[in-house]
Image (spheres, grey):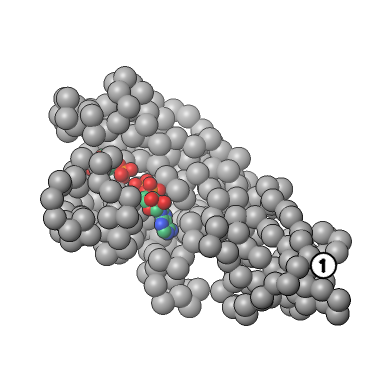
């Protein structure tokens, strides 16, 4: 559905091209227009978390509203609709195959994976959480501390083996799942997608949330961004080739360029989820020229 149709369907709003749109600091997107009598403002969904039209939280108020022009804001309103359209387009060709998101720590596997699962009607699993449940602890950090990294890796492989027998799920894998060839055997029962995020952006995200839950990055002292960037760089040197085994790659740099964005940080998780579906579609059509398995 086009955004204009959406707003028209709401019954009391003119087509979108006569409106102004902007994102609020709370993540909501506002559409506003000036009428002869008063300003009207409508709040649509939180575009970061609620891609489904059916989930739009709607409220309308009449007050003096300052409208800000921004082409990017129009895109934000339309993003959930574009995502939904793309998912409807490729769903029949997925035929229930699972989607495995791989990528470095902090690349957005969990955030984007949840959005994808919702729009595709799939279940969502975070393999780290399944390992925690299997071991009976509450954090991966605890597993590394009480047992060892190799104990964690063994359990990660068992979890991926179990998941590989299932259908209709999006799996956010742990950043290191790619290093064991046996894990690829299990993940290749579905479609694997690499979220390729520049290391500087990863370090910024991780510095913002802290490294407590990521034992391979945890360091008590020093500048969090610099430490994270340094450690991520050496992990990436070891793993870069392994990530490239994925069936499809979503390069945030390419995705940002496509949308005329200067910085990958301006890409919303919804836009990234859409790009995942675009790249899966290319893979299914065999457009990547090497491993296409055909859409039908
Ligand atoms: N597109 C994005 N833009 C900005 N921050 C993001 C984006 N995607 C994820 N994040 C943030 O980065 C952090 C790591 O994301 P997460 O989804 O947990 O990554 P992963 O599962 O790959 O480790 C979280 O704080 C999340 O909110
Ligand atoms: O890169 C890695 O080796 C790891 C990534 C983590 O998952 P996320 O990528 O979800 O942070 C988690 O599996 C563990 O801390 C090891």
Above or below for 30 versus 242: below
Place of residue 185 in the rendered image (x, y in percent of width and height, measured from the top left) = 32, 37
Asked whether 177 or 288 is in front, the reply is: 177
- On the image, the x and y values in percent for residue 296 come to 58, 48
Rendered position, 268 above or below 20 = above
Q: Is residue 198 visible?
A: yes
Left or right: 124 as drawn, with respect to 39: left
Say which residue label 1 marks.
13
What residue is drawn where x is 16% and y is 25%? 147
Return the x and y of residue 264 as percentages of the image width and height: 39, 68
Left or right for 78, reference 222: right
Q: Residue at x 55, y 58 (%)?
A: 27
Front-most of 67 and 97? 67
Rendered residue at 35%/41% (across/down): 173
Crowd band around label 1 with a 10 angstrom C-alpha radius: few (<14), some (14–19), many (20+): some
Position of the N terminus, as image quadrant, is bottom right
Left or right: 216 in relation to 66:
left
Nearest the eye: 26 or 53: 26
């Amino acid at each position: 559905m086009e955004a204009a149709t959406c707003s028209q369907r709401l019954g009391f709003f003119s087509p979108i091209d006569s409106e102004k749109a902007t994102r609020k600091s709370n993540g909501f997107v506002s559409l506003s227009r000036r009428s002869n009598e008063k300003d009207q403002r409508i709040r649509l969904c939180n575009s970061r978390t609620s891609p489904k039209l059916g989930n739009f939280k709607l409220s309308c108020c009449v007050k003096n509203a300052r409208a800000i022009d921004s082409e990017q804001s129009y895109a934000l309103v339309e993003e959930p609709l574009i995502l939904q359209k793309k998912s409807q387009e490729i769903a029949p060709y997925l035929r229930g195959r699972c989607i495995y998101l791989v990528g470095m720590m902090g690349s957005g596997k969990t955030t984007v994976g949840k959005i994808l699962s919702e729009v595709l009607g799939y279940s969502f699993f975070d393999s780290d959480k399944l390992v925690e449940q299997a071991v009976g602890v509450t954090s991966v950090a605890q597993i590394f501390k009480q047992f060892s990294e190799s104990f964690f890796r063994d359990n990660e492989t068992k979890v991926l083996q179990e998941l590989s027998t299932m259908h209709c799920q999006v799996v956010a894998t742990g950043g290191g799942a790619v290093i064991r060839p046996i894990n690829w055997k299990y993940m290749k029962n579905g479609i694997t997608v690499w979220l390729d995020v520049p290391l500087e952006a990863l370090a910024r995200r991780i510095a913002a949330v802290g490294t407590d839950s990521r034992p391979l990055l945890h360091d008590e002292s020093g500048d969090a961004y610099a430490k994270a960037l340094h450690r991520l760089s050496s992990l990436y040197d070891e793993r870069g080739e392994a990530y490239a085994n994925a069936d499809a790659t979503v390069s945030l740099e390419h995705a940002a360029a496509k949308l005329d964005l200067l910085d990958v940080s301006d890409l919303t998780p919804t836009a990234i989820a859409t790009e995942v579906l675009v790249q899966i579609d290319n893979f299914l059509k065999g457009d990547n020229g090497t491993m296409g398995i055909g859409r039908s």
